[in-house]
Image (spheres, rainbow, N blue to C red):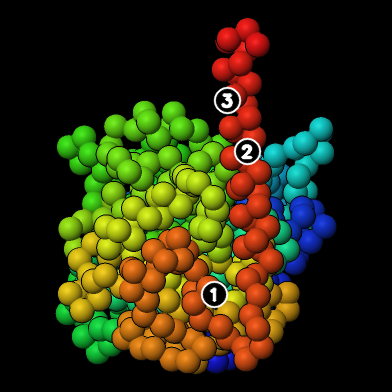
Amino acid sequence: MASNNGKDKSLESWIWDAACSIRGAKDAPKYKDYILPLIFTKRLCDVFDDELNRIAKEVGSRKKAFQLAKADHKLVRFYLPLLPDDPEQPVWSVIRKLSDRIGEGVTTHMRAIARENPLLQGIIDRVDFNATTHGQRDLDDDRLSNLIEAISTKRLGLDDVEADIIGKSYEYLIRKFAEGGGQSAGEFYTPPEVGTIMSRVLQPEPGMEIYDPTCGSGGLLVKCEIAMEESAKGKMRTVAPLKLYGQEFTPETWAMANMNMIIHDMEGQIEIGDTFKNPKFRSKGRLRSFDRVVANPMWNQDWFTEADYDNDELDRFPAGAGFPGKSSADWGWVQHIHASMNATGRAAVVLDTGAASRGSGNAGTNKEKTVRQWFVDHDLIESVLYLPENLFYNTTAPGIVLFLNKAKPQARQGKVFLVNASQVFEKGDPKNFIPEAGIQRIADTLIGWTEAEKLSRSVDHADLKKNDYNISPSRYIHTSDAETYRPIAEIVGELEVIEAEAREADAALRKILKELGV
């Protein structure tokens, strides 16, 4: 994360130093299982101290403030059942002063906090700091003590750091985990510049309901709130916050998303479970609909079958679209997102680059192309953004952002706006990134439908039909003077789909022949 002030930078350095204090105890992606709940608890402790001090000014002492907070939990946002021997000492000192059986003590305190605060149950009490594998502690007391001491070096109260600074540093740490964690860590993390572009283009307005069906650590939802606040500028005190909703399949990542929302002090509800098979947000037996939807589902999921689509009772997969093929659920997710949009809803979803072109130009029919055609013919696709390569932590592929709109302005009907931003990036280590000027240029281009040579173009549906419903910006916008070739990743992806469909057809034929006794 780019930082432009010393306070930001020092907090980032501090948060990474804390993670490094247990280096060697766990491989990098699993640092988060220990450090994120502890940093989150440190924030809770310091804010609780601030609230106790406020009460103490009115009643004369911290001892009385502790007693009042214990008697009436409504006096504070989160009541922490941690009482130092000396009431003048920080609440965090109860954890910091643990000297024996530290893992057991930390786990006990975390669970006690969760018992007192239903909102935190399953979030901070999920990790057992005393866990063992084959008789060996996963994180021994010496390393845990080092981690606690590293976290203790900075105060995280209301007057020390803003919630958003904490949130940004949290995002920084998640990015560092993704850098070290490869595919598994990258699954819960979307590069911040991609999320920023998506949220600025969607232009969320005060009070809107925003939904992410595959929310990971909650970053895209947070980006929408930040975009709304930025557009409100000096009116912040008079505007309603967004209402943020998300669902996440992995329990540890679900907990991370909840911590991220709370640490940003945002209004939200994060559910746990498989969105594709059991979406939790429903109303009167149907999918609940939202003003805006953002998502970065895992690309090319191949574990959903045609039966999963046929058995759906929520009208997510309409006739004419439906099953996009076994090899990739990308357009299945797009259909779920479309069904989750209200009558004037808009959406932005990150997909594999091949989702824009697979099946186009092939002889015969292609299930994925059929779904893509359905979305074009129903005029639901507003724009497509082709991203630079090597932005994402679980792949070097560029990816696209598909923007949907159920209420396209008349001037934009019958057209799709394409942006090829493959050259709008700077080299980074280990990943490329889009600088702030590039982020704003891309967002402004998409918002204004501004055509620019080698960057953007408005394409009529008739042209898309001529190109067999290929909606990839790289097909229509060349970024160099030399002859431009299609990206290798697109070609390989299409070959894989063709091979998978051939295997499916072959298996079906064999089954028929077997039944006929041939």
Extreme top residue here? 517
Mark 2, Cα crowd under 10 Å, few <14 / some 14-19 / many 20+, is: few
Q: Which residue is drawn at 51% across and 58% down?
A: 360
Amino acid on which the number 2 mark rests in the picture = Ala
Q: Which mark is first along the chain, 3 or 1? A: 1
Q: Residue 354: give its label.
A: none
Numbered disc 3: secondary structure: helix
**In the picture shown, does residue 283 fall above or below 66?**
above
Q: Which residue is drawn at 46% across and 66% down?
A: 467
User: From mark 1 to mark 3, how far is it between C-alphas?
Assistant: 35 Å
Residue placed most toward the observer, 180 or 151: 180
Numbered disc 1: secondary structure: helix
Amino acid on which the number 3 mark rests in the picture = Ala
Residue placed most toward the observer, 367 or 124: 367
Asked if residue 34 lies left or right of residue 212, the reply is: right
Residue placed most toward the observer, 187 or 60: 187
Mark 1, Cα crowd under 10 Å, few <14 / some 14-19 / many 20+, is: many
Amino acid on which the number 1 mark rests in the picture = Ser
Asked if the residue at tag 2 contacts the one at tag 1, i.e. Cβ–Cβ closer than 8 Å, the answer is no
Q: Which residue is drawn at 73% across and 74% down?
A: 430
Q: Residue 474: give its label.
A: 1
- Splitting the image into 4 quarters, where does residue 60 fall? bottom left
Q: Name the residue under label 3.
A: 508
Q: Which mark is first along the chain, 2 or 1? A: 1
Q: Could you tell me residue 113's position as x and y percent?
A: 46, 48
